[in-house]
Amino acid sequence: MPPSQSEDILSSMANILILEPYYGGSHARFVNGFRRHTRHETTAYTLPARFWKWRMHGAAVTLARQVSEAGPRPDVVFASDMLDLTTFQALTRHGLGNVPAVLYMHENQLTYPPPPGTGRDLHYGWINYASMLAADRVLFNSQYHLDEFFDELPRLLKHFPDYTNLETIDGIREKSDVLHLGADLARHDPHRSEPEEGSPIILWNQRWEYDKAPATFFDALYALAREELEFRVILAGQNFRNIPEEFEQARERLGDRSIHFGWEEDRAAYSRLLWQADVVVSTAIHEFFGLATMEAIYCDCYPILPNRLAYPELLPSEAHSRHLYDDVAGLLERLRWAITHRGELGGHSLRRPVSRFDWDRMIGAYDAIFDAVAATTE
């Protein structure tokens, strides 16, 4: 590389301070993937992925202390939605001053469905809102997520008795963009295997949580079993508490049909499970992006997904009628077809369309945003 080109690259590198109070699961994979692929210099401060409410309250204080005791001043702060950015900036004002901040919205606490039997604590949605006010750029992981948040935000502000600051919404919207999640999809390639003999394999690789509506998924499987259709099931996906009742019941009722049960910590073994499966199903009632589903599709799983949330945005429009369902009847119809036409599933692979989310293809857009933000302080 000629000296002039090398000097240009070095001069365009920014020093990015990454702040992730909830370093686990997809948040951790996002941070790690970004750091591996960006051409910018990065320093990350993280906290373990537990006690999410306390992280949203207290992480800003903890991380501000750690950053204040650390090294050189960054060019840009890159924070996740789990950080109270306003408190962090107030506590680091002497050291970081006017360093611009980019806020990445993996999820938000204003539209994320609360657990059954509980109400929404608006304070956490307020933290997201105030952090957006303080940020220089706000990035959402899907258009669905952005639209849903800005549909709900006026209702949050109107909840208060006066000085509702509704006029601030337009300013936040103007500095907000959609930047889909980057993912290490190519890491699954070395573990690819040929389809095995036997009945088709249906995959669940999402979190074992209420917002993924596992009861709907299992009810569909039980209906197919009553029809005496042949299929097997892989029940993977991460679980952060005791095994939910639906999954315990499914292990008993599905019996020998269940060939894997539980989260697979080993990433290579997890990849092999994805390649082993034929069909991936989502019954989620809420999904801001759907990383686990995109990983399964990349590994040639045939997707059967709800015709809502982020899924219509992420799949090509010509695939919608085949892969997206509107109700339980549509779910069962597509599952029956997939189970009885296993040999035809490979002809409908969506691996190529979803490969656009691989970090190798996404990183250019991320780096360009940090180039632009860093330039505002030069």
Image (cartoon, rainbow, N blue to C red):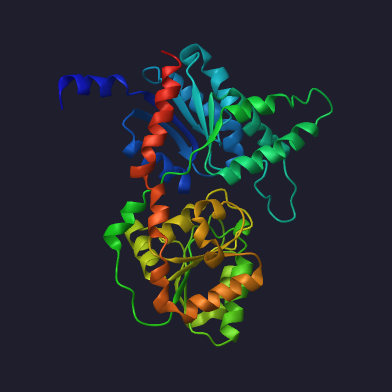
Q: Residue furthest front?
A: 318
Task: Determine which quarter of the picture holds residue 55.
Answer: top right
In the picture, measured across the screen, residue 7 lies left or right of residue 368, that is left
Task: Determine which quarter of the picture holds residue 173.
Answer: top right
Can residue 51 be seen here? The reply is no
From the top left corner, tell me how far across and down residue 153 is, in percent: 70, 36
Name the residue: 45% across, 61% down: 263
Can residue 319 be seen here? The reply is yes
**Please, is residue 365 above or below residue 259 in the view?**
above
Name the residue: 33% across, 57% down: 188
Q: Nearer the viewer, residue 80 or 102?
A: 102
In the picture, measured across the screen, residue 341 lies left or right of residue 36, that is right
**Which quadrant, please, contains the C terminus?**
top left
Task: Determine which quarter of the picture holds residue 243.
Answer: bottom right
From the top left corner, tell me how far across and down residue 354 is, in percent: 42, 54
**Please, is residue 12 above or below residue 351 in the view?**
above
